[in-house]
Amino acid sequence: MRYTGIVKNQRRILCVFPGYTPSFGTFQHAFKLMGNVKAFMPPQGLLVIAAYLPASWEVRFVDENIKSATTDDFTWADVVFASGMHIQAPQINDIRARAQAAGKVTVLGGPSVSGAPEMYPEFDYLHVGELGDSTDKLIAILDESIVPPATQMRLETIERTPLHDFPLPAYDKIGLGKYLIGSLQFSSGCPYRCEFCDIPQLYGRQPRLKTPEQLTAELDGMMSQTFRPSAVYFVDDNFIGNRKATKDMLPHLIEWQKRHGYPLQFACEATLNIAKQPEILQMMREAGFITIFVGIETPEAGALKDMRKEHNTTLPMFEAINIINSYGLEVTSGMILGLDSDTDNTEAALTTFIDASNIPVLTINLLQALPKTPLWDRLHKAGRLVESDGLESNVRFLRPYEEVIGSWQRCIEHAYAPERLFERFRYQVDATYSNRIKTPLRGKLSLANLVRGLALTWNTLIYLGIKPKYRGIFWRAALHALKRGQIDTVFNMAFVGHHLITFTKEALEGEQNASFYSKHTKAPSKRMAA
């Protein structure tokens, strides 16, 4: 559904999504192995807004992770829309400055401004909250006038548009082939109240849902482009936030995959207690899911209780991971250092967990307090929030700052030493990847897969098989997979491993932030420039 009101004037809207500060999670070092890939994932939220605007209004869409908005773009526009997360705050304000220098009205929406509107005092309009009544009010205002208001106007959503009325994202405005993975949303909100998470405050604790028909229509939209990613990430805050809805949706996804010959693989985010849902796990396996991101956060039970994440302890942690792996689902994990409960033993507990869990990819992150979270409120009251360009986090840790940073550095060095990383991948070949369903070849026979596959084959050979000192370690893991017929596994461990090893080297040299939620930028690395 798009805007249903009547507009009297033509408008030209330039939607600009800001670039990300390079980090662990943007996988920027993997892009050069993938041929024409320039960015991680399409910006789902701004694409929905672009699709919702009146049909008579012209819309241009620029993702600055792919290319910068030009002077001609700003000259063309009547109004400039931006959106983004806290980590993108410098880039968001840079878009505003360029737009206002061109004399254009500026509008900011999305998660960052919804969580902390005070961070953006110079935008003309702030859209706080999700698509809803404030969106309609904003469109009506812009239809009347595109003269910047004398003072900033803040429009806050009171009545949210139901997800089942959301329009299909404006995929026609972007080239999906430029992205590493696609994005898809089924639900919004999460029933849990983890201390550090802003999702319940921003999107609610009662998950709201799209229909299965919407999801398959969005997948059809992706498939209509010749060049597109072969994997799609469900950006839901918690894939099993509403378990019944997930169970009801998955058969539709399975049927779509079977009808199209399984052209896509899926990934999602969920809580560790998904291990207690065998029916869901079995259907996820049949639907072609291959990865679940789980916020494990820490192997220490007391720390999980302190952060209100007891649901991670409903099963023994290693048992839960093994159950998930048995359905062909690789676990990737978020981990946090800098917690109030950290002790002299925390670092050793984390490195032991890394080795014992055999999880290849772990986002080992410094604690960062986000606005609109219980953590923010608690630390603010205690006077423990700090803002300094010289610090890696906005939290005043209870342990000495340099000790926390040193622990983070040693943990990522341990995790992403090539011999340990590829040994964990080697373990997954037998424990996880061998449990995936065998899908028909016809769904993979596409021009996009051929082009990307040729690029990936050549670049894997050069950047992992020949150039690096760890090439022998890579080949041992790769041959282990090839002997079991897992060609895709070789490519996956290549581009993931290349990024993780390169990122770690940069981080240890001070070129990357220790907190992946930090909005501070560091000087571009020589490897990024190359």
Image: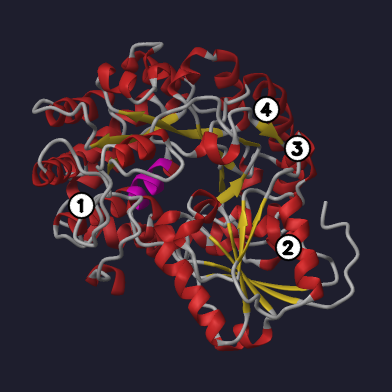
Q: Which residue is mark 3?
A: 259
Which residue in the structure is indicated by mark 2? 138
Task: Check the image and report above or below for 13 versus 247.
Answer: below
- The type of residue carrying mark 4 is Leu
**Left or right: 507 with respect to 314?**
left
The reply to whether the C-beta atoms of the residues labelled 1 and 2 are less than 8 Å apart is no
- The residue at which mark 4 appears reads as 250
User: Is residue 517 shown to the viewer in this render?
Assistant: yes
Residue range in magenta is 489-496
x 75%, y 44%: residue: 161
Three-letter amino acid code of the residue under disc 3: Arg
Measure the alpha-carbon separation of dots 1 and 2.
Answer: 55 Å
Q: Is residue 361 magenta?
A: no
Upstream in the sequence, badge 4 or badge 3?
A: 4
Q: Earlier in the sequence, mark 1 or mark 2?
A: 2
Question: In which quadrant is the C terminus drawn?
Answer: bottom left
User: Residue type at mark 2?
Assistant: Leu
